[in-house]
Amino acid sequence: LGSSLRGTLDKLQGKTTLSEDDVEEIVKEIQRSLLSADVDVSLVMDLSDSIRERALDEEPPAGTTARDHVLKIVYEEMVELVGDSTDLPLEEQTIVLAGLQGSGKTTTAAKMAWWFSKKGLRPAVIQTDTFRPGAYEQAREMCERAEVDFYGDPDNDDPVDIARTGLEATADADVHIVDTAGRHALEDVLIDELEQIESVVDPDRNLLVLDAAIGQGAKDQAERFHDAVGIDGVVITKLDGTAKGGGALAAVDQTGSSIAFLGTGEEVKDIERFEPSGFISRLLGMGDLKQLSERVERAMAETQAEEDWDPEDLMKGEFTLNDMRNQMNAMNRMGPLDQVLDMIPGLGGGIKDQLPDDAMDVTQDRLRSFEVIMDSMTEAELEHPRAVGQSQIERIARGSGKDEETVRELLEQHKMMSQMMKQFQGMGDGDMQRMMKQ
Ligand code: GDP
Ligand code: MG
């Protein structure tokens, strides 16, 4: 599925604007991926609306292709959908794990304890499950493997009492993780027991543990647990299987919480702190969405830097290659150079006629080649292009993958534009500055 989304996006390569059909095709692919990852239909529909609206309304920033622009929107909206990771300060705290039987609570308790221990804290797991036979042994063994403190009492059948005693017995620990019993279904007895434990333990956080394969049931479960004790975060387990865990997003939405951890195997070390980009890539089956989004982010930041650039700088001092790059980009946004010159009041044809034809001929392709070449130049070379000699030209050509001829063309172009700038500097009135600033 991810590959068909990628295919759809790749078809946009080279396009500068998106049609409604383009956007619809992308939205359809995303819907297909998310629905097959068990994401709730209404969440998918909301996401689709946001992507449609933004992709058609927002102009791609200068220097961004339509494909990169829509990818950035998709990524941002997906981050909005999955949320940030649950805030977990690395300090003393008590965490209660809730969830149905088999969701992975006991395993997660030991994994989280291991995780906190690696962060330099001293965790302890308190096992209060008196319902499931073998629960005590299972938890004890896992905590032994995680090398963390453990408290349980197989002879006590009162979970609330175990919780109380357990907190006292593990008072030396910084992080207390209270594992609770589950039931096969949302029975009152389960909720009652959880509420009682919660009131005795007074935790800083209640985390709901959900199996990645959970589908439509997530919403009801989340609602029930949230009403009882308040859910602050979700743990999705068994992500090493085929299920992608999208169903759990309905629980996140229902509780207004976020995802804290992901379980990715049966061993103590198989735990990851939730991180949106990895999860989004898994949901969409695309590996590099974050990277692409960051690339667009960078391009936009550079555009911003250009906008901070003051054309008046051109009127003073030496005209450098950095100035030329900024100017080419600014002109690129305004239109072809000769048309720009025509728009300057009082300039008339006079100066244009004195300029070599090539000065006007900065085509898109050349501009792109020049950009690539300038990326291979040092700051000193960009500031003092006239000092660039043959050995540097060879190095720049090798570094940029362009031929030496094109590097020389760039330097020629710079020389011509720098002459042109001198003429403008001679003009001395503010018209040029005003033009360039627009
Ligand atoms: P609990 O009833 O909620 O305490 O669930 P358990 O911690 O006992 O886990 C139920 C089963 O799921 C056990 O067989 C675990 O080994 C398994 N399990 C839990 N987390 C994961 C996981 O992330 N990946 C895999 N593959 N199995 C898991
Ligand atoms: Mg258990």
Image: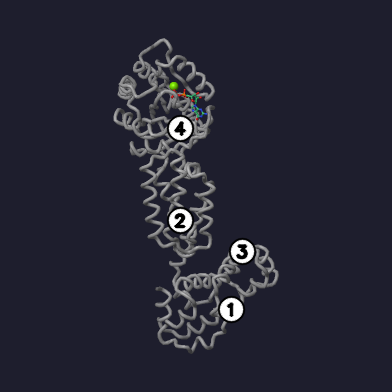
| Disc 2: CA contacts within 10 A as few (<14), some (14-19) or many (>=20) | many
Which residue does the numbered mark 2 point to in the structure image?
70
* Above or below for 318 versus 284: below
Looking at the picture, tell me which residue is in the foreground, 275 or 199.
Answer: 275
Q: Which amino acid does label 3 sit on?
A: Ser
Give whichever of discs 3 and 1 has the lower sequence position.
3
Residue at point 49%, 73% (across, down): 327
Which residue does the numbered mark 3 point to in the structure image?
376
Which quadrant: the C terminus? bottom left
Q: In which quarter of the image is residue 397?
A: bottom right
Where in the figure is residue 245, as x and y percent of width and height?
45, 36
Give whichever of discs 2 and 1 has the lower sequence position.
2
The answer as to whether callout 3 falls within 8 Å of ligand 1 is no
Picture disc at residue 415 = 1
Assess whether mark 4 and mark 2 are in contact (beta carbons under 8 angstroms): no
The answer as to whether callout 2 falls within 8 Å of ligand 1 is no
* Above or below for 247 versus 9: above
Residue 76 visible at all: yes
Q: What residue type is labelled 1?
A: Lys
- Local secondary structure at mark 3: loop
Is residue 160 shown left or right of residue 245? left
Picture disc at residue 213 = 4
* Above or below for 66 versus 346: above
Picture disc at residue 390 = none
Where in the figure is residue 45, as x and y percent of width and height?
37, 46
Q: Which amino acid does label 2 sit on?
A: Val
- Local secondary structure at mark 2: helix
Q: Nearer the observer, disc 2 or disc 3?
A: 2
* Above or below for 206 versus 6: above
Give whichever of discs 3 and 4 has the lower sequence position.
4
Looking at the picture, tell me which residue is in the foreground, 358 or 239.
Answer: 239
